Image (tube, rainbow, N blue to C red):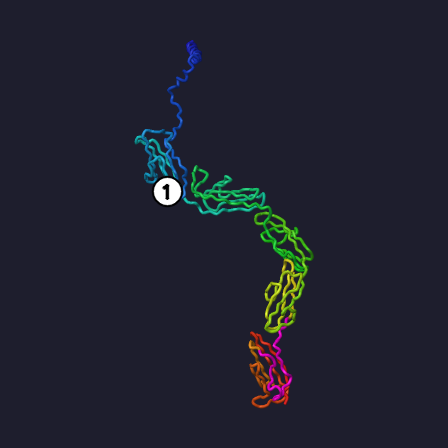
Amino acid sequence: MKYSGRIRWIGTILFLFPALAMARPDWFRELFRNQPAQKEPKAAAVVIRYDANVLCLGSYCNLEMDHSAYGPGTDLHYTWLLLSDGTVVGREKTLTFTPGMESVYGLCAVLEDMGKEVGRDTLQIYVTHVPEYQPVPDTVCYGMEATVGVEGGRYWAWSTGGTTQFVNVRPAETTTYYFRVSEYPIAEYGYENACYAEDSVHVAVLDSAVFTIEGPGGICQGVPVTLEVKGGSDILWNGVPGDARHSFVAERDTGIRVTATDRHGCRDTKEWQIELVDRPEGRIMAYVDGEDVDSVCLGKSVRLEVDSRQADRFRWFTRDTAVSIELEPKSAFLAWCDLFSGPSDQCSTRIQREILVRNCNRVYFANGFVPGGFTKTFGPIGVEDSTRQYYFAVFNRNGTMVFSTTEFSQGWDGRYKGKDAEAGTYVYVFRETYEHFSWTKRGTFTLVR
């Protein structure tokens, strides 16, 4: 019974509570009116606004104290300090900061109102230099992945959005990619970087493999020919694996299919055509004063010319490569010339012709000599040439020289050591020297008493 009254009292309160709430709907709010409310974080009174905090040595940045969160104030004062030693570097709302060396500078912006500090903010400025770097391009076949990059620097930003030193791309055609490179971050961590180099790098997209085939395009039948692949690997010659060099004998016009992979990974097949050409034929013509001759007078020039319809290249024994040459021979010689046809020097023919050189001064010797007769002496008969040197000698049957001279007009009088020489057969030697060339004539004659 003692609990029944309490229960009725509690029930009455619970019954009246909703009624009271309905009668005064703001009472719950008033009940907690004096309770502390959850506060929003207060904005900083001072914030440093800047256009860059990474600078190249020699450049500058613009700084500003933003105190919009604090308000206009009554008597505002601005102070810029170096955090390293507290040096004052500015007393205006804005500051143009020009660093003097590569380093990290700490700056503090202090705002005072009526002599009392009401807010401050700090900022680090990084002073560095533009790094040395080298772009790294790439060349790939169509559909392959390429890797481009930068040798140098510590931070990178690519037009593709990448921020690593090297990036992988798969362009459909030759493409240029742009990048920035710096010693400090460019596009991350909130840096405003004003010290970087900007450049570009290319990816060349190839339609086919880059390798070359070297060898003759034409060859004589039955002559071995060698083809060589430059810049290719994993080579197939007409579908058969082989080395970079391939040799064979061409018996007819032939087409060679070469399949190879280049250093970029491209694989392709190229054709090389071999055509058989006829061996050239011809003859050497020797012209003196417009006439084809077999000999030339000593001291005169001769023009040698090739008469050939098949040859398209020439190589004379003098190493000249013209169709004709002109020279002044000093002695008999064998003239030859190699004739070439087609694109290969292996299809060639050598033609030759012997050219004689004769003394055209018409020097003669008599068959006999009678001392005291019509001719007082025995010697050369002809016209003396002042441009030549002469030597004339006479020998008896024992080989003893009985006379010699270097004068063209001087002959032997038939005497030896002051006495008349014996009748009989004697030998003469006559030599002309012309520009270091000597022409010699030997013969016999009869001394008659």
Q: Position of 194 compared to 160: left or right? A: left
- Badge 1: how crowded within 10 Å, few (<14), some, or many (20+)? some
As drawn, 418 above or below 3: below
- In the image, the segment drawn in magenta is 355-384
Q: Which residue is mark 1?
A: 99
Q: Quadrant of residue 381?
A: bottom right
Element at badge 1?
loop
Quadrant of image for the C terminus: bottom right
Q: Quadrant of residue 11?
A: top left
Where residue 272 appears, x then y in whole percent? 64, 53
What's the magenta bit mostly, secondary-structure-wise? loop
Q: Nearer the viewer, residue 216 or 364?
A: 364
Q: Is residue 10 visible?
A: no
- The three-letter code of the residue at mark 1 reads Pro
Please name the residue shown 38% across and 21% down the image: 35
Where residue 7 appears, x then y in whole percent? 43, 11
Please name the residue shown 35% across and 29% down the image: 72
Q: Is residue 372 visible?
A: yes
Q: Nearer the viewer, residue 166 or 445?
A: 445
Count of numbered tags: 1
Q: Position of 65 compared to 273: left or right? A: left
Quadrant of image for the N terminus: top left
Where residue 363 appears, x then y in whole percent? 61, 79
Where residue 318 appears, x then y in whole percent? 59, 66
Q: Is residue 177 magenta?
A: no
As drawn, 208 above or below 112: below
Q: Is residue 357 magenta?
A: yes
The residue sitting at the left extreme is 115
The residue sitting at the right extreme is 252
